[in-house]
Image: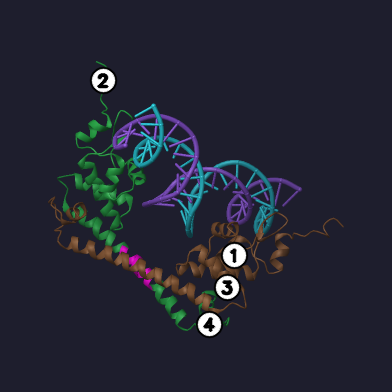
Chain colours: A green, B brown, C purple, D cyan
DNA sequence: GGTTGACCTTCCCATAATGGGAGGGTATAG
DNA sequence: CTATACCCTCCCATTATGGGAAGGTCAACC
């Protein structure tokens, strides 16, 4: 009679029901265990189910969500935008215009960041071009950094 | 007799000797007062002189150093690299090869970052290109993020 | 001389995304 | 039954920047 009414399963039972523990979820999704816990804590993921020993267990659907997050991260979306994207993803009645707007916003900020870094690189390349890079101390790079006139 | 041997000047005296207070230094260098204090604290700048009321005072040379830091930041150098650059700048016997090596290292990491962001942008653009962006829910962008197959 | 507003000081907190590590409990293979 | 590998929570660190509080000071004006 003792264990009949338990709500939380043991690990072996959970596994038989198609659940994964956190390191399996990590391998399947490419998200580190540390980050999986973090995403749960900031509310990006729903709180994971637990075994009776308080171990997190993850369903196929959880794994899928983690993969979504992973891929969105690799496209450079911030956590906040990913939260929005996840909501849209789970809202089967979303207008695709909203998704597209988010994506284009992100493309634009990528373009701005790219442009800024290209300008840095070009400025620095121009300075470096004129630096002999030998044992002597005179250096157009340092001069360029010290006087912006 | 009372004030003759003081080491720390008053603000008005300091100003007459060509010193600036922190907000003047901030305006002249483009570095915020907050950051000037921070740079001092992490040892990037020597500790500033003080008035007898404990206000920081900055010489022309300090301002120049702050401008150097500002410009190096705007080229994307990290604080650690800037510390090294400052040391080289102040070492009148440096070999310019060292400066050039640092610069080229930085150019390379800029190029890597640029490439990564371009790849993000291109992937996302390709997804967005096929999204109608209307009131209907089907969305190639979300599909692309959810399945990396 | 006194008041007032602008400025200075230090100290603590927050950001964004990620990881390291300690201290203590658990699963599982042999 | 015991290793060992894994899980848990909690705290700390990173990078560069800023916000804000509590308290002292400077400057200008009456």
Q: Residues within 10 Å of mark 3 (few under 14, many from 20)?
A: some
How many C-alpha atoms fall within 10 Å of the one at disc 1: few (<14), some, or many (≥20)?
Answer: many
Q: Establish if B35 lies above or below B110.
A: above
Residue A19 disc label: none
Lateral position of residue C27 relative to residue B144, left or right: right
B140 to A13, vertically: above or below = below
Quadrant in which the N terminus of chain A is drawn = top left
The chain containing the residue under callout 4 comes to A
> What is the chief secondary structure element of the magenta stretch?
helix
- The residues tagged by marks 3 and 2 sit, at their Cα atoms, a distance apart of 71 Å
* Res B8 → quadrant: bottom right
The local secondary structure at tag 1 comes to: helix
Q: Is residue A117 magenta?
A: yes
Residue A18 x %, y %? 19, 37
Judged by depth in the image, the label closer to the viewer, 4 or 3, is 4
Tags 2 and 1 on a common chain: no
| Residue at numbered disc 3 | B88
Identify the disc placed on residue A134: 4
User: Residue A142 in the image: x percent, y percent?
Assistant: 53, 76
Q: Which stretch did the figure color magenta? A: A110-118
To which residue does mark 1 refer?
B25
């Amino acid at each position: 009679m003792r264990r009949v009414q338990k709500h939380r399963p043991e690990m072996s039972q959970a596994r038989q029901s198609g659940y994964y523990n956190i390191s399996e979820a990590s391998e399947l999704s490419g998200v580190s265990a540390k980050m999986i816990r973090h995403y749960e804590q900031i509310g990006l993921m729903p709180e994971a189910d637990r075994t009776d020993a308080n171990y997190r267990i993850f369903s196929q659907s959880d794994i899928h969500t983690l993969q979504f997050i992973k891929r969105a991260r690799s496209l450079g979306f911030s956590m906040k935008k990913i939260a929005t994207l996840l909501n849209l993803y789970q809202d089967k009645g979303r207008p695709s215009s909203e998704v597209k707007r988010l994506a284009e916003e992100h493309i634009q900020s990528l373009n701005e960041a790219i442009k800024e870094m290209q300008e840095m690189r070009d400025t620095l390349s121009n300075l470096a071009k004129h630096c002999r890079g030998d044992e002597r101390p005179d250096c157009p790079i340092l001069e360029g950094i010290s006087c912006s006139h």
